[in-house]
Structures are given as C-alpha cells and as structure tokens.
Amino acid sequence: MTGARIRVLVGKPGLDGHDRGAKVVAASLRDAGMEVVYTGLHRTPEQLVDAAEQEDVDVIGLSILSGSHMELLPQVRERLQAKGLDHILLIAGGIIPEDDAEELQAKGYAQVFGPGSSTADIVAFIQNTLNHQS
C-alpha cells in the first residue's frame, strides 16, 4: 500500500437491521484517510462480493449482530475465493462468541472485533496489516 488510499467496503450481511456500529466504524475509517464504501443493510454475500469487486477494495469489514455469522461470513470468503479475490483483507465485528471468532479466523478472517473494540484499534489493524503485505 505505497501511497494509495486504502479502500474499505463496510457491509451488513443478512437480516440484521442495526447499523449504528457499522456507521461509526465507517466514519472512523474515513476520518483516518481511507476511502469507505458503505453498502447498507440486508446485503447477501453475493451482493457484498460483487460490490467489493466493482469498487476494487482492499478490505471488507462486515458487521453482524443477528447470530447468523457462522452461515453468512464463510459464504463471503468462499465467494471471494471463487472470484479470485482472496487477496482482499477480511475483518468482521459484532456479537460473535470467542469460539466462533477463532473459527472464522481459521477460515480466512484476519481479525474479529467484538463489542467495545476501539475504532482506533480497527484503523491501526487495517493499516498495519496492509503495510506489511506491500
């Protein structure tokens, strides 16, 4: 990531209708100098991956509170791989039990941020991870 602004897609998969946290994270990423695409509520894994491809993002951050994280989040990863987009950094946040977070990380999510996570920590994680990949 030399010189180019980091592009992040923030999405809300599934039927979860609470997006305040996602909007706070999106604003924090924007304030840190990243370009942010917010897809809105009720997106399918297909819609999220299509948007990530169209917007040529470096990162996908998914916020989920509905309890369907073990069904929907792996589908996003699988669809990215099928399209040859598995270079995109995947992170997630929301109400995700620790055991499930560990399983998601084993399935390709770089980090899972729980309730109360600092937006500064999310920004730093993205910046540090992408700077080490370049």
Image (spheres, rainbow, N blue to C red):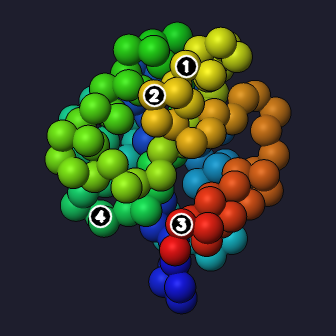
Q: Left or right of 97: which side holds 34?
A: left
The mark found on residue 12 in the picture is: none
Classify 72 as above or below 23. above
- N-terminal label among 2 and 4: 4
Give whichever of discs 4 and 3 has the lower sequence position.
4
Q: Secondary structure at mark 3?
A: helix
The mark nearer the N terminus, 4 or 1, is: 4
Measured as percent of width and height from the top left, residue 104 is found at 52, 25
Give the residue drawn at x 33%, y 33%: 76
Give residue 103's mark.
1
Say which element carries label 1.
helix
Q: Quadrant of residue 103?
A: top right
Nearer the observer: mark 2 or 4; the answer is 2
Instruction: Give the label on residue 133, or none.
Output: 3
Disc on the earlier residue, 3 or 2:
2
Q: Do residues under tags 1 and 2 come within 8 Å of each other at their CB atoms?
A: yes
| As drawn, 83 above or below 74 | below
